[in-house]
Amino acid sequence: MSTGFIEFDLDKGMGQAAMLVYRPWSVRTLKVRVTTQAGQPALRLRPSRVRPRDERDGRIRAEADNSDDFVISWGGGHEAGPCLKSVDKLKAFEECVPLTSEDTSFIFFNVQHIGPDVPDDAQVTLLAYNEESDEVTASITVRSRPIFRRK
């Protein structure tokens, strides 16, 4: 990944793909550049496999689609998913707003490898969705491969 981020074009809809290399037993930042030419309603981004809110600390986390060995987190785990674009509200809160045409947004996720194995391929599907209707409008599956493989 030479650009340092994953390209996620909302106008391309469902089934996009990207690659991320990870270092086993470490934390990696998944930086996603979200773009649109057509404009989009107020949307959020979340992994497809989100855990229920943790009762101990109230945080939300996710896991890779095909592995419990990866924990994905964002925004300290306090939001259902980060807004693709937000504005300040009352100097204390953020409010999700539409992405206008030719808009760009960067979203950051932490991807932590915690399991004992080094999977050859772990996948995280990110969904762009409308928080009110829960309708998914675009998706991208990020395949994660280790920097090295154990023999």
Image: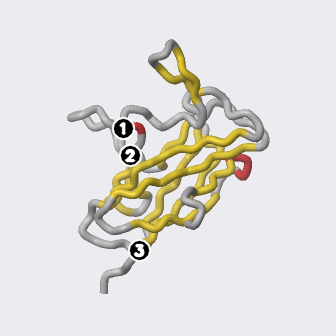
Image quadrant for the C terminus? bottom left
Give the SS element for disc 1.
helix
Q: Between marks 2 and 1, how big is the CA–CA gap?
A: 6 Å
Q: Nearer the viewer, residue 91 or 122?
A: 91
Mark 3 or mark 2, earlier in chain? 2
Whether residue 121 sits left or right of residue 58 in the image: it is right
Extreme residue in the left direction: 56
Residue under the point 45% across and 48% down = 109
Extreme residue in the top direction: 90
Give the SS element for disc 3.
loop
Callout in the foreground (3, 2): 3
Residue under the point 58% across and 37% down = 84
Image quadrant for the N terminus? bottom right
Whether residue 59 sits left or right of residue 131 in the image: it is left
Q: Between marks 3 and 1, how big is the CA–CA gap?
A: 27 Å
- On the image, which quarter does residue 68 sit in? bottom left
Check disc 1 and report the residue beneath it: 77
Q: Are marks 2 and 1 in contact (CB under 8 Å)?
A: yes
Q: Are marks 3 and 2 in contact (CB under 8 Å)?
A: no
From this view, report whether residue 11 is shown above or below residue 147: above
Q: Are marks 3 and 1 in contact (CB under 8 Å)?
A: no
Residue type at the position of mark 3: Ile
Residue type at the position of mark 1: Gly
Mark seen at residue 73: 2
Q: Between marks 3 and 2, how big is the CA–CA gap?
A: 21 Å
Residue type at the position of mark 2: Ser
- On the image, which quarter does residue 69 sit in? bottom left
Check disc 3 and report the residue beneath it: 147
Classed neighbour count for the residue bearing mark 2: other residues with Cα under 10 Å, few (<14), some (14–19), many (≥20): many
Mark 3 or mark 1, earlier in chain? 1
Callout in the foreground (3, 1): 3
